[in-house]
Structure formats: C-alpha cells, structure tokens
Amino acid sequence: MTPLKLIFLADTRPGHYHLAEGVIAALQRLRTVEVTRVPVERRWIVPTRWLRRRIASEHFWPPRMLRMAYRIDADTLPRPDLVVSAGGETLMSNICVTRLFGVPNIYCGSLLRGLGAENFSLVISSYDRDAGSPHHLVTLKPSAIDPDALGRPASVPHYGRERRPRLVGLLIGGNAGPFRYRPREWERLLAFVEEVSRAWGTLWLISTSRRTPAQVADRVSALARDKSVVARFIDYRTAGPGTLPEIFARAEVIVCTEDSSTMISEAVSARLPVVGVAPAAHRFTDEEQAYRAMLIGKDWCRVLPIADLTPHSFADALSEISPLAENPLDTLAATLARRLPDLFPAS
C-alpha cells in the first residue's frame, strides 16, 4: 500500500498537538504515513467571527483565507490524502486545506459555535455528549505514547497499604484557567513527597511543565539534591517538552496535578495507575467534569485534594485503581479503519 500523505496542522499548545500526534501514531499502525507538519498561528487582527462567516460564504476561497488569517501559502502545501489537526485555533485552517484539496479530514477537540461536524470526516471527542453524532468518535484522549514500546506490563499489580510502589512519577503543572495553586499547597505537595519516601523508602521521578512557577521548580531542584527522595528531576526550563516517556517507562505509578487533562490521559494510556492531586481553587467545565468522572468510573485513576495528601490516603487511592489493560493505540487504529474505510481498504 502506498504511503498515506498527511498534512498535520499544529498550533503552539502541547495539550492540543499531542492529541493529533496520538491520532497519527494510530494511523501509522494501519499504513505507512508521510507527515507534513504545518505550523498554525492565527493573526490576531483576524477575528474568529469573520472567519466563520467567510467559511460559510459561497465566495469562500481557501488560498486567500489561509494567507490572510494564517500566513500559509497554499502553493507550498503538498497534496495530501488526509488532514489532521487539534485545538480551536486549527479549526478553520483544517477546513480550508480540506476544501482546497477535496480530501478527508480529522479534527480532535470541541467544535466552535457555528461550525458543524459535517465540515469534518471525523471529529475525535472525549465527551459522551457527542456519542450520538455520526461524525464523532468518542474515545480516550489520543496519545502517541505506546505502552508496549515503553515496556509497560500488560498486567499491573495492585498497589496499596500491603504493596507500596518503589518508584513514583510526579508530574507538576501549574495555574491554568480556574486552577489556582496557593504557595502552601505547593509546600504541602513537596512535603508529601518527602513523607512517602521516609515512610515507604519510595524514590520519585519528578518533572515540571511550562506552567510550573519558577519558585516551585527551584524548590523541586533543591529537593532533588536528596537522592534518598528524588531519583530523577526533569526541569522543563532546560529539558523542554517530550520528556514524559522517560518517566512513564520507569515509574510504577503516577501522581499528576489535576490542571492537565492531557498529562493524566497520557499516563492512563501508558497503563499506569494515576492519582490526580487538586488544589482547593479549581473548577471543570461540565464536559471536562464528565470526562474525569469517566476515568474515575473505569477505575483508571483517583483524585485527592492536595490538603489531604498523606501516605495512608495515597495508599488507599492506589488500592482502588485497576489500570487500562489494552494498548489504546491498537484500539484507536481499529476504530479509525472502520470509520475511514476508503483510506484503509485492506484493514
């Protein structure tokens, strides 16, 4: 089978483009894929309302829209077989490139008001509200992380008071939207790390993110000097993105701040027990609350308030978790083959 030529429209937010990368990783299980990654950054002077009106107009001309709104020269784009993107800033550019070449397209995320699902061959959503739509595929948030390639066991032992993990990953985010961490909550989280190490002999693999406050990263860096507590510290400020697979490959369980749905989903996809930790000041949208409830309802993760973190509460949360058993990339690939049969006739 000839390679599948794909245009990947990527914005600047890892939480978005990682979703699209997860879809591409699933596609690669079905067919060789040639990816052209096109950066998408909308010019601030072009309002979203105007773009929506132009897309619905009979005078809509994709090359002009791409040039005016995104500084993308349509003449430089190779002809694709499929267009893939994630995140609201890529919605209109996805439609433009799709109409320009007359090819199928996949979008990951929620649609903006005024843009119907009929503009896409497939809309990948993680929210049950979309389950009845013929254009939607409702699934775990896609992740390119392959648990088999990481060496993750298909069957993970149950941890708890009787069986304690020896190596725990801690993924630290930061303030985002309605999530606000107070200084004392950061101190409580790091004190909990030390308490677990003293009580259980556990070592920690800790990673910060682009949202982590500098003072918190500095505090973790100081804690990392104690090798009886921290086995590995990955400072986002120097390491940059793309370091989570190292932690997922080594850790037995994951603790993750609740501000990042993507990090929690990636850890679940890696077949790891996941405990989210939440600040007092936080709020989810209704759809995100439903998604987190689904993860908890399937016993893939649990959530604890930072204020309530103790070795005992952590052990009790772990005892209730049964990690994902299958490889989610295989599951997504099989579903894509069924939903897009023209692209995968032999699948």
Image (cartoon, rainbow, N blue to C red):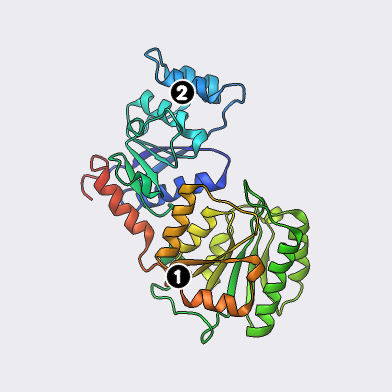
Label tally: 2
User: Going by the image, does 1 lie left or right of 231?
Assistant: left
Image quadrant in which the N terminus is located: top left
Disc 2 vs disc 1: Cβ atoms closer than 8 Å?
no
Q: Nearer the viewer, residue 155 or 305?
A: 305
Indicate which disc residue 293 carries.
Answer: none
Q: Relative to residue 184, is residue 48 drawn left or right?
A: left
Quadrant of the rendered image containing residue 122: top left
Q: Amino acid at mark 2?
A: Arg
x%, y% of residue 25? 41, 51
Callout 2: 10 Å neighbours few (<14), some, many (20+)? some
The residue to which callout 2 is attached is 52
- For the residue pair 219 and 9, the one nearer the viewer reads as 219
User: At numbered mark 1, what does the secondary structure look like: helix, strand or loop?
Assistant: loop
The residue that appears at 35% across and 44% down in the rendered structure is 130
Q: Name above or below for residue 163 compared with residue 69.
A: below
Measured as percent of width and height from the top left, residue 337 is found at 27, 48
Q: Residue at x 37, y 63 (%)?
A: 327
Establish if 72 lies above or below 8. Answer: above
User: Is 176 positioned to the left or the right of 11 in the image?
Assistant: right
* Residue ID for mark 1: 151
For label 2, the SS is helix
Q: Earlier in the sequence, mark 2 or mark 1?
A: 2
